[in-house]
């Protein structure tokens, strides 16, 4: 008995939901699209729509030594952060992810806590800490600081993958006479490899994009890309920053598609 | 079995030691620094902060900014999460991609895009002018309204994902039962869907609130130095004025304030969960 008021009710509900959801999709996409288009402008201002298109600002990046150095530093730091995070995080996840004991829950919460605490306070604390230890400003403190805020991603994804691994496989391997280590190497690790890869990918990206920790630990000699871009945008609206930002967007897009293909990354980000 | 358990425990040891050294260490150092004045144990930094109306007003406006951004974010994120949950698998995967990509893109880049959009020559003003909604360009860049809009957008994925997870756990039979018993879509939504998705809403609000109040990049680039919020104020004291003790006290008070609000949100989440089953 679809009366008129029922359909009106249904219609108005759907309409409100769809309009707001569509607005959100546009809102999420629009900035990135506009930024990409603007970065191909032929003029020296960040006007949208651009009056003409060219690759001149991307070409200008080839000359921009400081941006290049900062980008290289960010890649190096993200690489070492990922390596250390995977080594320490995988081991820790194997410990806490396979145990139901109270200590395992507490330790897991401890390892996850950098995600909850404001990273700005941690970054500032790390600045004082390394300064008091007398460690000169090099890459090392930045990597150590990044590991603290990136390792939770490795642990979370590895634990998720472990929980989906059929325990019967491990029991079968052990009862058939395989050693603990052999079982780990041939059964457990291959079973959770995708989860670890997803965690490593997210750790790499979040180290590359990290702002609050780098803000306090980086200086002129160890300039990091996000901090350098922030300074460039804050001081003068340099169109080269649009090209650099455009490259970051394109790079992220490509990496994400690769990660989606090899590690079904979106499943782990949910 | 005993050997097994010892092996498990040992594997967590390296990261445990690493965290004690490089996570607890810096936070402890921060706390010590905040409680020292000229090498003496003193509460002077805290007294100065809590007794200064200027700094208290910055703290208040930062906490309030987070609330506004979280509410705006919720208004747009909820329908998107709803659509993502109930859409066809194809549409769902497209929406998921749109939602996830920003998480992996640098926040500096995402905020930068908004400068192009919000400027008086920007797309937003041009569109509103063309539609005849406004007569002269709105000033959005360097205003709190602008900061709220951008924060709501930048943080949106953090709100969409938990809500969608909560929505997908709701038994679809409940909605059908509600419809069979004569409730319209709106009534079913307010009485069934919304209360049952409350845990996801609270989880999203916690993430967005904590993110928005501490969003240094968005606050400084969209708000500029004229709109001073806690993160920039701490940075200025720490690196500009080289006043480490005071900056440390500021960051601890700020962190405590944010965590207290998060704690109450968490509590609200638990209470709302209780209500659903008690009804």
Image (cartoon, grey):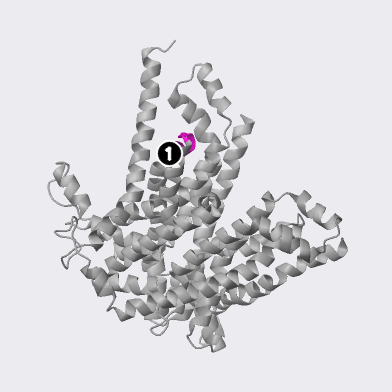
Up-down: is A176 above or below A244?
Answer: above
Q: Position of residue B148 (x, y in %)?
A: 34, 53
Up-down: is A267 above or below B234?
above
Return the residue nearer the eye: B268 or A211: A211
Residue A47 included in the magenta stretch of the image = no
User: What main secondary structure does the magenta stretch of the protein show?
Assistant: helix
**Where is residue A37, by image quadrant?**
bottom left
Q: How many residues crowd around disc 1 within 10 Å: few (fewer than 14), some, or many (20 or more)?
A: some
Circle 1 sits on which residue? B91
Residue ID at (43%, 78%): A73
Q: Which residues are magenta?
A: B78-88
Q: Is residue A153 visible?
A: no
How many circles with numbers are drawn on the protein? 1
**Horizontal and vertical percent position of residue A130:** 54, 83
Residue shown at the point (50%, 53%) measured from the top left: A261
Magenta highlight on residue B79:
yes
Using the image, determine if residue B138 lies above or below residue B142: above
Q: Going by the image, does B270 lie left or right of A8?
A: right
Q: Residue at x 73, y 49 (%)?
A: A166
Res. A6 image quadrant: top left
Mark 1 falls within which chain? B
Relative depth, front residue between B259 and B100: B100
Residue B32 pos. (x, y %): 57, 78
For the N terminus of chain A, the image quarter is: top left
Q: Secondary structure at mark 1?
A: helix
Q: Quadrant of residue A54?
A: bottom left
Q: Is residue B95 left or right of residue A204?
A: left
Q: Is residue A150 left or right of residue B66?
A: right
Q: Residue at 44% of width from left, 62% of height from top?
A: B214
**Rendering coords of residue B53 (x, y %):** 38, 66
In the rendered image, is residue B49 in sight? yes
């Amino acid at each position: 008995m679809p009366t008129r008021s029922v359909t009106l009710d249904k219609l108005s509900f759907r309409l409100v939901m769809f309009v707001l959801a569509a607005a959100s999709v546009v809102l999420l996409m629009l900035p990135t699209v506009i930024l990409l288009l603007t970065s191909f402008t032929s003029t020296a201002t960040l006007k949208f729509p651009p009056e003409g298109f060219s690759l001149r600002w991307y070409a200008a990046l080839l000359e921009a030594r400081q941006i290049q150095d900062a980008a290289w530093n960010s890649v190096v730091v993200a690489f070492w952060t990922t390596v250390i995070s995977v080594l320490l995080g995988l081991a820790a996840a194997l410990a806490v992810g396979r145990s139901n004991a109270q200590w395992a829950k507490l330790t897991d919460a401890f390892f996850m806590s950098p995600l909850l605490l404001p990273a700005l306070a941690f970054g500032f604390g790390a600045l004082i800490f390394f300064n008091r230890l007398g460690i000169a400003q090099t890459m090392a403190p930045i990597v150590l600081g990044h590991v603290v805020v990136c390792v939770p991603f490795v642990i979370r994804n590895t634990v998720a993958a472990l929980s989906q691994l059929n325990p019967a496989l491990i029991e079968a391997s052990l009862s058939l006479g395989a050693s603990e280590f052999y079982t780990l190497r041939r059964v457990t690790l291959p079973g959770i490899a995708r989860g670890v890869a997803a965690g490593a990918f997210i750790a790499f990206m979040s180290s590359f994009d990290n702002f609050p920790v780098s803000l306090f630990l980086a200086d002129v000699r160890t300039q990091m890309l996000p901090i350098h871009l922030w300074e460039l945008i804050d001081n003068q609206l340099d169109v080269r920053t649009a090209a650099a930002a455009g490259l970051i967007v394109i790079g992220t897009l490509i990496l994400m598609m690769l990660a989606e293909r090899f590690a079904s990354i979106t499943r782990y980000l949910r | 079995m005993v050997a097994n358990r010892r092996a498990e425990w040992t594997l967590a040891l390296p990261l445990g030691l690493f965290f004690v050294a490089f996570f607890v260490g810096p936070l402890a150092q921060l706390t010590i620094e905040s409680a020292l004045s000229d090498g003496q144990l003193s509460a002077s930094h805290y007294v100065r902060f809590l007794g200064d109306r200027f700094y208290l007003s910055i703290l208040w406006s930062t906490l309030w900014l987070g609330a506004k951004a979280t509410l705006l974010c919720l208004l747009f994120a909820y329908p998107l999460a709803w659509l993502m949950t109930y859409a066809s698998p194809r549409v769902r995967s497209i929406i998921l991609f749109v939602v996830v990509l920003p998480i992996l893109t640098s926040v500096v880049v995402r905020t930068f895009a908004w400068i192009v959009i919000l400027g008086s020559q920007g797309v937003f003003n041009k569109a509103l002018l063309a539609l005849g909604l406004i007569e002269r360009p709105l000033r959005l860049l360097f205003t709190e309204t602008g900061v709220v809009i951008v924060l709501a957008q930048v943080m949106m994925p953090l709100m969409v994902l938990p809500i969608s997870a909560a929505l997908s756990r709701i038994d679809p039979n409940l909605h059908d039962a509600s419809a069979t018993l004569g409730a319209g879509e709106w009534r079913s939504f307010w009485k069934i869907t919304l209360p049952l998705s409350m845990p996801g809403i609270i989880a999203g609000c916690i993430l967005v609130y904590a993110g928005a109040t501490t969003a240094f990049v968005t606050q400084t680039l969209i708000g500029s130095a004229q709109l001073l919020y806690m993160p920039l104020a701490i940075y200025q004291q720490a690196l500009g004025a080289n006043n480490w003790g005071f900056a440390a006290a500021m960051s601890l008070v700020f962190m405590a304030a944010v965590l207290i609000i998060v704690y109450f949100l968490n509590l609200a989440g638990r209470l709302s969960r209780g209500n659903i089953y008690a009804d």
